[in-house]
Image (tube, rainbow, N blue to C red):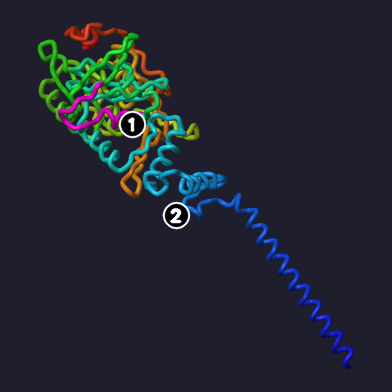
Amino acid sequence: MEIMEQDKKLKIAKKIGIIVICLALLGGTFFVGLKVGEKYYPSINLVEGLENKELGKPANVDFSLFWDAWHLIQTDYVKSAELDKQKMIYGAIEGLLGSLDDPYSVFFEPIDAEKFNEDVNGSFSGVGIEIGTRKGILTVISPMEDTPAWKAGIKAGDQIIKIDGKSTADLTTDEAVKLIRGNKGTIVILTIIHKNSDTQEEIAIVRDTIVVDAVKLSFLDNDNIAHLKLLNFNENAPYEFYQAALKMQEKQPSGMILDLRNNPGGYLEVAVDIASWFVPKNAIVVRENIKGESEEVLKASANQSFVNLPVVVLINEGSASASEILAGALRDLRNVKLVGIKSYGKGSVQEVKKLFDDSMIKLTIAEWLTPNGVSINNNGLEPDYKVEMPEDLNSDKDPQLDKALEIIKTII
């Protein structure tokens, strides 16, 4: 009996010994694995002063590289004690948008988001030009009429080489806007290469408050022809166009010249709203190609007051985005003739996404096509009647408007 008890105790002791050895081995393996894995373990847990480290991480992306870089900056950068973590986050987001290689997808810090909203509301302080990047060069899309830039002789297609002596070669459009903007009464010096020229010219421009009227209306040929300048598609444009429409209905003109020259665009919805005055109800004004996977169409609403009014449209290289949508719709749906020179060719749609801290992302979400499915992006609209403007910047002659007036008289 005693022998059996001893055998039993011996077996239990052996089992306990085996368990202890296994635990020791497991513990050692874990310790060794931990030490070996430290090299590859994401640095996110070593980064101090951050919240929400795990929320919203994209699937199938090894994000550890980002946190490794962050941790390296935090530990080894010579001025690590002065790091502004919020600024680093904003810089990272800017880098994300920059990697898209799309000049129209940009990030705005809160203060810049506020300035952007001022722009679309129709009032800001600056020189009055719309700029973009064309073939890697900062280029004037359009000078706004009667602004300091306009009066200084800045033209659509001009290349901006320097801003106050600083090269624009490595600047984003947003960075350039920040440099050009400034308080009323201050001076900014733009180094310009005019279109069709190789010579640089320094132009000093005094900044001013830019109040952007959307619509200017006049009457030509003894008030028989309405000349309606649509200068942009900001949020005030529908109301201003409505006011102009009331004046035209009083005058009862026989035709209209719709002047979209140097109109850099604006809200897509505004372009569709204004197009609705000219085309049949429910006609497709624009097609949106979304990621090449689906298509959405935007149709004319209930206006149609000018659907039977003869119209000729003026365009130039400063006519971009929403103005190209309107011109393209009128040509496709009503065979309206375009006069001037080829438009800018911005055929993409941006949507503004507000972030929780009042920063903002303006993101390209689609490319747009005319009602007949013609892509404008990087191509522009070719006029039916090509007419150049005089090279003399001080000339009062307007052969484009003269040609439009000649054509409208043949169809009224």
Which kind of residue does numbered mark 1 sit on?
A: Glu
* Farthest-out residue, bottom: 1
Residue density around tag 2, few if under 14, some if 14–19, many if 20 or more, within 10 Å: few
378 lies left or right of 386: right
98 lies left or right of 407: right
User: Residue 175 bears which disc, if any?
Assistant: 1
Nearer the camera: disc 1 or disc 2: 2
Residue 375 vertical placement versus 409 (above, below): below
Residue depicted at 18% across the width and 22% down the height: 148
Q: Position of residue 152 (x, y in %)?
A: 20, 17
Residue 360 visible somewhere in the drawing: yes
Residue 35 vertical placement versus 256 (above, below): below
Residues rendered magenta in the picture: 173-189
Q: Position of residue 166 (x, y in %)?
A: 32, 24
Residue depicted at 24% across the width and 32% down the height: 234
Q: Nearer the viewer, residue 68 or 121?
A: 68
User: Is 321 inside the magenta-drawn segment?
Assistant: no
Q: Find residue 30 and report its image quarter.
A: bottom right
Residue 327 visible somewhere in the drawing: no
Which kind of residue does numbered mark 2 sit on?
A: Glu
Residue beneath disc 2: 48
Residue density around tag 1, few if under 14, some if 14–19, many if 20 or more, within 10 Å: few
Q: Position of residue 385 (x, y in %)?
A: 31, 8
Local secondary structure at mark 1 = helix
Residue 116 vertical placement versus 221 (above, below): below
Residue depicted at 39% across the width and 36% down the height: 363
Q: Earlier in the sequence, mark 1 or mark 2?
A: 2
Quadrant in the picture for the N terminus: bottom right
Q: Find residue 310 and report its image quarter.
A: top left
Local secondary structure at mark 2 = loop
